[in-house]
């Protein structure tokens, strides 16, 4: 259903879901297809982490080059996601889904047949272009179609996609690499992606409204330099100790910061006329601002731990890729089991009774990793503390997502989804850069002090998780300010 509008039209508010708590006709099927497709595409964000050593040998490339398979993915995501606010308002649900899954399938095919590093990187970039659209599409669709009284449990399902898919990415790649080459990571995914695309184009109907909004090209350019520069700079921090960087780290960070300032100013000016690429009026809603910041802090810790823990298992405990993947699997499974349960609890009790203990659990787990992970740590301890960490994340993510986006006026759902997704990418890159930098510098300091390689690396791992523990204290403080969206917030309008 399309709503006619002029180029200067006001923000288009989607049709409200039924007041009695029922889902609109066709909504369960649409949401189910979007969840399945989003899980597949988000899984690929971290699937390369365990595969990099094999790729370096097979393609004869150094670590700094291989890292671009992850960095390039993040860079593309950071450039495309800010545009999804415009995309989701301008085009129909079916059109957006078709483009997203076509891009992801095409990128997967390119990566599967890549003869060398350049083509493989191209495939990852095309994959990321589709991935960047899927999560905002899923979140906006759920917010539009699902009544407020049922959003918690639905956001619990989305949390499986956002948190569990990246968490089990290393497990999936470890299982595949134990018997097959790295190409099979893409060959196995390709038919699943194509089937999801076909089912979506067949079954998904246009249940939301669109508007003929204008694309501000200058904002696109600014966002490219802003988010691309910041992601590139943050990702390069972990490599800076190796030397040989083409550009000093401070250059992309400075360019990104200046472009971000210009981007924010541009959006503030454009949103007065509803032309903003990424409408920042979302931050006028206190519940959104607090939950979005806390979500970002949590994503820093999540992505930092996703990078450091496999390195510890392989470089300190000397486990193989298959053993590493299997050891990380219970944590991912636990998140998947807890997320829907937490969603139902949110619908009953609101966010604060969940977010506060969740933040405390995450902090306890990170401090535990900072003290327990050394050369002789028992595998059982590693599994236990990893389970504790993932349980804390599972308890936090659903209430934070629901509180942030549910507090917005419906006309800002697309922009809120794009904003939270952009912040998650920046936070993930920042967390990865911070943890890897601390690991590298602490390890080098240990080696310089005469420690063995194992002892120095273990000390670096502990130092990285110590930083995570300090960050988690800020999350505990912020958790006391998270509030449940009121009915007036959910239905009300934000003043221009």
Image (cartoon, rainbow, N blue to C red):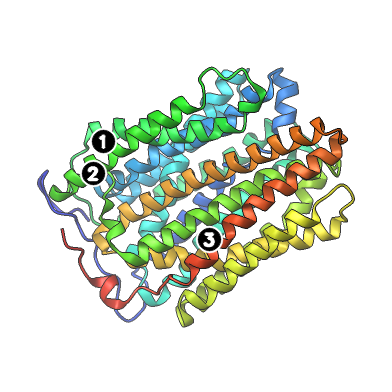
In the image: residue 112, left or right of residue 311: left
Callout 3 crowding tier (Cα within 10 Å): few <14, some 14–19, many ≥20: some
Distance from disc 2 to disc 1, alpha carbons, whole Å, reads 8 Å
| Pointer 2 residue | 267
| Residue drawn at point x = 90 percent, y = 50 percent | 376
| Residue drawn at point x = 50 percent, y = 50 percent | 37
Callout 2 crowding tier (Cα within 10 Å): few <14, some 14–19, many ≥20: many
- Residue 219: mark in rendering: 1
Where residue 239 sits in the image (x, y, percent)? 62, 28
Q: Secondary structure at mark 3?
A: helix
Asked if the residue under mark 1 is in contact with the one under mark 2, i.e. CB atoms within 8 Å, the reply is yes
Q: Closer to us: mark 3 or mark 2?
A: 3
Residue furthest out toward the front: 449
Distance from disc 3 to disc 1, alpha carbons, whole Å, reads 32 Å
| Pointer 3 residue | 474
Where residue 117 sits in the image (x, y, percent)? 61, 20
Number of marks in picture: 3
In the image: residue 421, left or right of residue 315: left
In the image: residue 468, left or right of residue 385: left
């Amino acid at each position: 259903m399309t709503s006619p509008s002029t180029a200067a039209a006001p923000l288009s508010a989607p049709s409200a879901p039924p007041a009695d708590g029922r889902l609109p006709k066709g909504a369960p099927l649409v949401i189910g297809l979007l969840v399945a497709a989003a899980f597949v595409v988000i899984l690929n964000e971290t699937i390369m982490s365990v595969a990099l050593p094999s790729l370096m040998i097979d393609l004869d490339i150094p670590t700094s080059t291989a890292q671009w398979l992850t960095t390039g993915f993040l860079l593309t995501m950071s450039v495309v996601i800010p545009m999804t606010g415009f995309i989701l308002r301008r085009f129909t649900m079916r059109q957006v889904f078709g483009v997203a899954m076509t891009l992801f399938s095409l990128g997967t095919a390119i990566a599967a047949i890549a003869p060398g590093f350049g083509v493989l990187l191209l495939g990852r970039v095309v994959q990321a272009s589709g991935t960047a659209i899927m999560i905002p599409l899923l979140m906006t669709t759920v917010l539009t179609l699902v009544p407020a009284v049922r959003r918690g449990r639905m956001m619990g399902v989305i949390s499986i996609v956002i948190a569990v898919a990246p968490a089990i990415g290393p497990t999936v790649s470890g299982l595949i690499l134990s018997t097959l080459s790295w190409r099979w990571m893409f060959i196995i995914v390709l038919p699943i992606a194509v089937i999801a695309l076909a089912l979506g184009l067949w079954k998904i109907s246009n249940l939301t409204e669109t508007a003929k909004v204008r694309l501000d090209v200058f904002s696109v350019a600014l966002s490219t330099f802003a988010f691309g520069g910041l992601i590139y700079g943050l990702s390069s921090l972990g490599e800076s100790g190796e030397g040989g960087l083409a550009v000093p780290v401070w250059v992309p960070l400075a360019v990104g910061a200046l472009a971000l300032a210009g981007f924010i100013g541009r959006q503030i000016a454009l949103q007065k006329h509803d032309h903003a690429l990424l409408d920042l009026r979302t931050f006028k809603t206190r519940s959104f601002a607090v939950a979005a910041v806390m979500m970002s802090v949590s994503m820093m810790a999540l992505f930092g731990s996703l990078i450091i823990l496999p390195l510890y298992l392989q470089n300190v405990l000397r486990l193989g890729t298959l053993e590493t993947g299997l050891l990380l699997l219970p944590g991912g499974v636990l998140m998947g089991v807890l997320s829907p349960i937490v969603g139902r609890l949110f619908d009953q009790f609101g966010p604060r009774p969940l977010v506060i203990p969740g933040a405390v659990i995450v902090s306890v787990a990170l401090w535990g990793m900072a003290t327990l992970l050394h050369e002789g740590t028992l595998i059982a301890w590693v599994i236990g503390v990893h389970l504790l960490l993932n349980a804390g994340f599972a308890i936090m993510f659903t209430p934070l997502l629901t509180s942030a986006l549910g507090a917005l006026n419906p006309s800002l759902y697309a922009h809120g989804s794009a904003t939270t997704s952009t912040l998650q990418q920046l936070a993930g890159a920042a967390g990865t850069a911070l943890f890897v930098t601390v690991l590298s510098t602490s390890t080098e300091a240990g080696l310089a002090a005469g420690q063995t390689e194992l002892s120095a690396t273990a000390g670096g791992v502990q130092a990285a998780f110590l930083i995570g523990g300090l960050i988690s204290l800020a999350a505990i403080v912020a958790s006391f300010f998270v509030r449940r969206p009121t009915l007036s917030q959910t239905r009300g309008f934000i003043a221009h």
